[in-house]
Amino acid sequence: MVYIALIILLVAIELLYFKIADKYNIIDKPNNRSSHTSITLRGGGIIFPIAISIAFFGICFLGSNPRSGFGRGS
């Protein structure tokens, strides 16, 4: 159940970032050297450090036992 909540949280954060990137025009316009042909939002990789931070918080501060899975295991 905790994994599903984390996936939903990270997808929501990613969609929020894409809205911010679209609002502030954080885009990559293709040129002759580009491998893509349409305008692409940049910076989606910022989700990875956020995901690692959330996992670290869950393990260190919520009392997770590595043998029992994520969160407060039995």
Image (cartoon, rainbow, N blue to C red):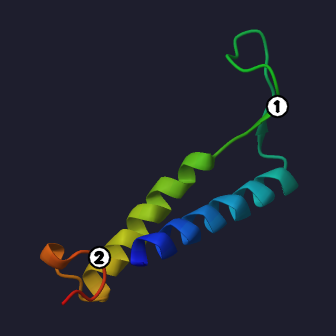
Measure the C-alpha gap from mark 1 to mark 2: 38 Å
Q: Residue at x 54, y 56 (%)?
A: 47
Instruction: Give the label on residue 70, or none.
Output: 2
Q: Nearer the viewer, residue 6 or 32?
A: 6
Mark 1 surroundings: few (<14), some (14-19) or many (≥20) residues within 10 A:
few
Q: Residue furthest left?
A: 67
Residue 3's place in the image compared with 18, above or below, is: below
Examine the image and state in which quarter residue 37 appears: top right
Residue at mark 1: 39
Residue placed furthest toward the top: 32
Which corner quadrant of the image does residue 1 belong to? bottom left
Quick one: 54 or 8, which is closer to the camera? 8
Residue type marked 2: Phe
Residue 21, given in percent of the width and then of the height, sits at 77, 53
- Secondary structure at badge 1 equals loop
Mark positioned earlier in the residue sequence (1 or 2): 1
